Image (cartoon, rainbow, N blue to C red):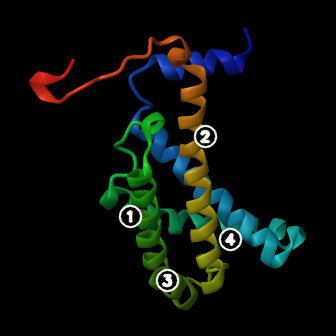
């Protein structure tokens, strides 16, 4: 049995992934999207040279995104049963986080001189991280549906409603 199948069986036999696991996964998506935006805008060499400053800036931005996650409760649903409402909550939480990063960027630039990402870069981080978080949720839902034993379920037809249903 491969390590992937062991992890798959462990996750899908539990009732849900812990809250901290979902928040950590979302934070990783935001951090990696910041690195990707840095590579796209400045190139890989400059991003590697500014890695420490970019990491500090992205960790500060993560605090803003966590506020958005907390307000919208993006971590509270069961990830394998995600719906469009959950995707909407993820987008709004990331929008809240992105809006909160604008004054933080100004503060970091004026006071500390550590802001690496520009305003357009922060918008790109919002877009990429939102898309990545959507993809994670859709992939988990798809993997659950494909891996579960729903294929062998007996089909039924419900006729009627409430007490009259047969």
How far apart are the two marked residues, 4 and 3, measured between alpha carbons?
A: 17 Å
Mark 2: which secondary structure? helix
**Among numbered discs 4 and 1, the one appearing first in the sequence:** 4
> Residue 75: x and y, percent?
39, 46
How far apart are the two marked residues, 1 and 2, measured between alpha carbons?
A: 23 Å
**Among numbered discs 4 and 3, the one appearing first in the sequence:** 4
Q: Which mark is nearer the camera, 1 or 2? A: 2
Q: Which mark is nearer the camera, 1 or 3? A: 1
Taking the spot 83% from the left edge, 65% from the top edge, the residue there is 48
> The C terminus lies in which quarter of the figure?
top left
**Among numbered discs 1 and 2, the one appearing first in the sequence:** 1
**Among numbered discs 2 and 4, the one appearing first in the sequence:** 4
How far apart are the two marked residues, 4 and 1, measured between alpha carbons?
A: 23 Å
Residue that numbered label 1 is attached to: 68
Mark yes or no: residue 118 visible: no
**Among numbered discs 1 and 3, the one appearing first in the sequence:** 1
Residue that numbered label 3 is attached to: 102
Please name whichever residue, 25 or 62, is drawn nearer the observer in this view of the structure.
Answer: 25
Q: Is residue 153 left or right of residue 114?
A: left
Residue that numbered label 2 is attached to: 139
How far apart are the two marked residues, 2 and 4, measured between alpha carbons?
A: 32 Å
Please name whichever residue, 158 or 6, is drawn nearer the observer in this view of the structure.
Answer: 158
Taking the spot 87% from the left edge, 67% from the top edge, the residue there is 44
What is the quadrant of residue 30 in the picture? bottom right
Residue that numbered label 4 is attached to: 53
């Amino acid at each position: 049995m491969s390590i992937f199948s062991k992890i798959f069986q462990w996750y899908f036999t539990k009732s849900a992934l812990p809250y901290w696991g979902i928040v950590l996964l979302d934070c990783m998506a935001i951090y990696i999207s910041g690195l990707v935006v840095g590579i796209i805008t400045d190139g890989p060499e400059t991003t590697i040279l500014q890695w420490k400053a970019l990491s500090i800036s992205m960790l500060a931005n993560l605090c803003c995104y966590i506020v958005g996650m907390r307000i919208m409760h993006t971590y509270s649903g069961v990830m394998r049963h995600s719906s469009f409402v959950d995707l909407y909550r993820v987008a709004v939480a990331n929008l809240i986080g992105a809006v909160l990063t604008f004054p933080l960027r100004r503060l970091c630039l004026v006071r500390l001189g550590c802001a690496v990402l520009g305003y357009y870069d922060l918008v790109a981080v919002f877009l990429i991280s939102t898309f990545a978080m959507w993809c994670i949720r859709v992939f988990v839902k798809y993997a659950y549906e494909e891996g579960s034993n729903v294929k062998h379920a007996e089909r039924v037809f419900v006729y009627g409603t409430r007490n009259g249903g047969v």
